[in-house]
């Protein structure tokens, strides 16, 4: 009798342990990714990827869940892709640029309407795409240490939830041009802003209003109007 009770206790303890494992793994437990968002990620894979960073982004039968792909984080309730982070790619190794992704930031990302965190720092992208303005939920945007030149798209001003924006570069060769500065004044949630090597000659600074929320501002190497 005693043995039976003991066995029963052991059995329930085991069940509890298994159940506990299941619920405590909540943080690592990946929900199924949303089909439309997976297709968008697969199309984004068209970027230049000499280091094969995106090798886990495949639609193999064993790898259907894009929430487990490298650099991708999904919301644990809704399963929407909420984060894309390739910042570590650069830090992973000493001459990081071999592992950079680059070219054009593909517009298929627009499908990721719930994205709130985008970090492509230390990669090889050359342009800030205009569609960046459609990521209405973006809170964090880091495009630093990319060889970005060309116009800063005024659509950036649509990102009214943005708190962190880093557009600083690592090289003096790459110059960004601001056609106007009105977009900056619309970033009313901004707390931290870094910018280097931007040409504001044409933009002027008349409408350059700083959000009251801003507590960190680092601007260097920029050309300002006389
Ligand atoms: C879901 O994620 C949030 C924050 O990202 C976390 O606080 C929460 O505990 C998570 N819930 C589960 C069930 O893992
Ligand atoms: C970065 O992109 C340029 C073309 O845009 C290419 O010539 C260069 O090889 C790329 N560098 C790396 C490290 O991928
Ligand atoms: C973003 O802002 C531009 C003007 O700055 C506007 O024309 C556009 O409709 C807005 N919406 C999106 C999704 O970019
Ligand atoms: C900065 O922009 C102005 C006007 O857009 C242009 O005339 C000037 O050549 C630019 N300066 C540099 C150093 O590229």
Image (cartoon, rainbow, N blue to C red):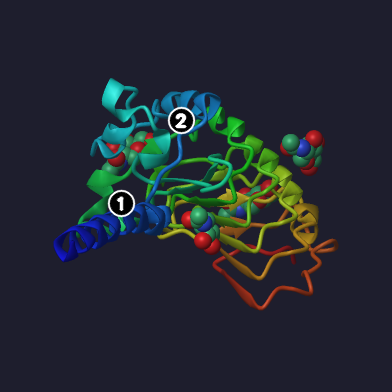
Q: Classify 10 Å Cα crowding around label 1: few (below 14), some (14-19), many (20 and above).
A: many
Under 8 Å from ligand 3: the CB of mark 2?
no
C-alpha separation, residue under disc 1 versus residue under disc 2 = 17 Å
Name which of mark 1 and mark 2 comes first in the sequence: 2
* Residue 172, visible in the rendered structure: yes
- Horizontal arrangement in the rendering, residue 58 relative to residue 192 (left or right): left
Q: What element carries label 1?
A: helix
- Horizontal arrangement in the rendering, residue 55 relative to residue 112 (left or right): left
The spot of residue 85 in percent (x, y) is 43, 50
> In the image shown, does 24 or 163 lie closer to the viewer?
24
Q: What element carries label 2?
A: helix
* In this view, 65 is above or below 121: above
Q: Which residue lies furthest to the right in this view?
A: 206
Q: Which residue lies furthest to the front in this view?
A: 1
Q: Which residue lies furthest to the left in this view?
A: 3
Residue located at (67% from left, 58% from top): 162
> In the image shown, does 57 or 8 lie closer to the viewer?
8
Residue topped by disc 1? 89
- Horizontal arrangement in the rendering, residue 2 relative to residue 118 (left or right): left
Query: Which dot, 1 or 2, sits closer to the camera?
Result: 2
The spot of residue 8 in percent (x, y) is 24, 57
Per the rendering, the mark at residue 213 is none
Residue 133: image quadrant is top right
Q: In which quarter of the image is the C terminus?
A: bottom right
Residue topped by disc 2? 41
Residue located at (63% from left, 51% from top): 138
């Amino acid at each position: 009798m005693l043995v039976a009770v003991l066995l029963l206790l052991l059995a329930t303890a085991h069940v509890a342990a298994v159940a506990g494992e299941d619920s405590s793994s909540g943080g690592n437990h990946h929900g199924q990714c949303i089909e439309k968002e997976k297709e968008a990620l697969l199309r984004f894979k068209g970027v230049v990827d000499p280091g094969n960073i995106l090798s886990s982004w495949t639609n193999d039968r064993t790898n259907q869940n894009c929430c487990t792909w490298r650099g991708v984080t999904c919301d644990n309730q809704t399963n929407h892709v909420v984060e894309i982070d390739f910042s570590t790619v650069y830090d992973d190794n000493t001459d990081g640029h071999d592992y950079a992704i680059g070219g054009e930031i593909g517009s298929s990302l627009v499908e990721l309407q719930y994205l709130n965190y985008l970090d492509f720092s230390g990669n090889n992208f050359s342009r800030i795409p205009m569609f960046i303005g459609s990521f209405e939920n973006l809170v964090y945007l880091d495009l630093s240490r990319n060889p970005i030149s060309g116009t800063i798209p005024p659509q950036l001003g649509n990102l009214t939830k943005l708190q962190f924006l880093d557009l600083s570069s690592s090289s003096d060769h790459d110059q960004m041009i601001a056609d106007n500065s009105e977009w900056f004044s619309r970033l009313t949630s901004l707390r931290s802003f870094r910018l280097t090597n931007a040409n504001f000659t044409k933009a002027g600074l008349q409408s350059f209003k700083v959000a009251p929320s801003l507590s960190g501002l680092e601007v260097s190497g920029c050309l300002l109007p006389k």
